[in-house]
Amino acid sequence: MFLQQLINGIALGSTYALIALGYTMVYGIITLINFAHGEIYMVGAFVGLYATTILKVNYLVAILIAMVVCMLLGMFIERIAYRPLRKSSRLSALISAIGVSIFLSTLAQMLFGANAKGYPEGVFPVKQITIGSAEISTLQLLIIAISALLMISLEFIVHKTKIGKAMRATSEDYNTAALMGINVNMVISFTFALGSSLAAAGGVLVGLLFNAVSFNMGLMAGLKAFAAAVLGGIGSIPGAMLGGLLLGVTEVAGVAFGFSSYRDAIAFAILVLVLLVKPTGLLGRKIQKKV
Amino acid sequence: MADFLQQQLGYINPYYLQIIVNIGIGIILALALNVVTGLTGQLSLGHAAFMSIGAFTSAVITIKFGIPFTYNLLLTGFITAAVAALIGLPILRLTGDYLAICTLGFAEIVKVLFLNLDITNKALGLSVPAANTTIPMPVVVWIVVLLTIVSVTCIHNSRFGRALMAVRGDEIAAEAMGINVTRYKVQSFAIGAFIAGVGGGLYAHFMGYINPSDFGFLKSVDILSMVVLGGLGSITGSVIGATILSAAPEFLRFMANYRMLVYGCLLVCMMIFRPNGLMGGISFTDIVLRTLGRKPRLKIIMEQKKSGT
């Protein structure tokens, strides 16, 4: 029973981690909480859905298509809604992000209707594999495998490539990075693209897992993923991964113990607790406030 | 007197009456958020939670005790303010983005809680009986609106208001100047919650039916849009913003589906092109004084300074 819930939690948590990575990277680089990130995840899920139903492609290709579309969407949003506000106060940027989020989710509601849509049968044939006392479905294995693959690739990009070095430099100190000759605008666009593509993959995977894609899945998932990012330490990439997994496991554990109607509140309770007790999160750096 | 008012109101088209009352409630809520976000600079994305607490508290008081409406509203306001002070004490240590997300989380927790409690009738929502007052509802609402405008104006011009503005400007500098930042933040949060709670109570009794899902994130965004449109920190701005955004859906019925699209665009465009809002930087008293032919007070002082007297 415990193992089963652990597996369920890790599968769910991996999807939260994918979304949380986008939040944490954007926050690390321009200290903005990208409210619209949840909506990008939702768009990714829809693109994956239509790729499998209309274009009738393989699920892996669908994930790739969703990632590319959301990459472009993320970069577009950054260009339109956040870049003009880079010199303004944080409050302005945050309100702008909320505006984008509202816009996208309403647009999705208008385009795709208010009902939840499901993936067609046979996109991913689900089989159950028994490990000890627990059963793991091939879908959960796929989620964990793809999430792990994407996270390892992200770590590689951030630590072993030149653009990754530029990303780390920009998140360290934005102005100095510009002085060092880094094209900061391009780095920020790249960060948004990376984060959005991960969220899109998460969206397709969650769509497959719960077999429900609807216009309002972005808000809840976005907030929960943000809670995960804060739990792990906002600005820290390993923190987002850890936070996502922990949040997934905690939520599943909460439901298993009978709190299923308070399911959504668990994530927020964790968020509030973390912010009150240790705002820098589990793996976050201590931020010195300069006066 | 109450019958006289009722008779007068009978002449007005009920549809327009409803719009007027909605505008009134919108103004109350916008002013509530303005005290917290505009005056003190603390972005609160969960203000609908206080409206919700106020609505349900007021409804339950009417159902269980049936006390006169004035006392009902006062009690509701105090209870909501007490909850806000309790929540605010730990939460208001955070700044900026974190506070915003925390308030959002708190609002969601409140919503989920109300959806699961028996006293609020779980997900079915509460049917609210008529308020225990002889004065017709629209008049009550607008009396409260006037009282709120007067009180918030008094707060703006008082020592307390100036302290809040100092906190908005720079918290560390304010602390260095001897302002107990946490205390003032919690107090402003409580005031904002009091007003929102009263607004919620009025909303509950006017609508006749409340459901916890009505007071979610979208409602908070509604209120935030009113304040942002009018201008953060501007009282006239909140009034104008609330009026426009409460009345517009009625006159733009054909655009009903696009309403949230417009709100989203509105927020983004306002931030990019006019972050101070419609009334940002413009003082209403200046306009009034100018039309009366007198110079605004600050100008006189500034001119004296320039000429060296």
Image: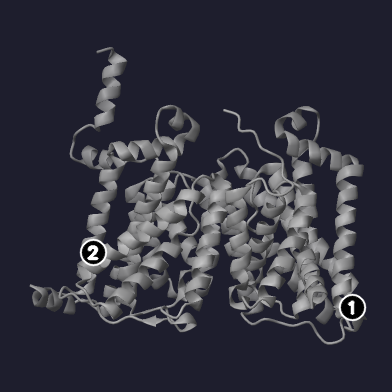
Tell me the residue at 82%/61% (across/down): A68
In the rendered structure, the answer to whether residue B49 lies left or right of residue A164 reads left
Give the amino acid at mark 1: Thr
Residue A176 on image: x %, y %: 74, 29
Q: Is residue B307 visible?
A: yes
Tell me the residue at 70%/66% (across/down): A250
Residue B130 on image: x %, y %: 25, 80
Disc 2 is placed on an element classified as: helix
Residue A291 on image: x %, y %: 57, 28
Residue A140 on image: x %, y %: 84, 74
Tell me the residue at 74%/67% (across/down): A249
In the rendered image, which quarter contains the N terminus of chain A?
Answer: bottom right
Q: Which residue is mark 1?
A: A138
Q: Is residue A204 visible?
A: no
| Badge 2: chain ID | B
How many badges with numbers are in the image? 2
Between B81 and B222, the one nearer to me in the picture: B81
Give the amino acid at mark 2: Trp
Q: Which residue is mark 2?
A: B142
| Badge 1: chain ID | A
Instruction: Give the number of the disc on residue B78.
Output: none
Asked if the residue under mark 2 is in contact with the one under mark 1, i.e. CB atoms within 8 Å, the reply is no
Quick check: A240 above or below B115? above
Quick check: A167 above or below A36? above
Alpha carbon distance from label 1 to label 2: 61 Å
Disc 1 is placed on an element classified as: helix
Between B254 and A183, the one nearer to me in the picture: A183
CA neighbours of label 2 inside 10 A, class few (<14), some (14 to 19), many (20+)? some
Between B65 and B292, the one nearer to me in the picture: B65
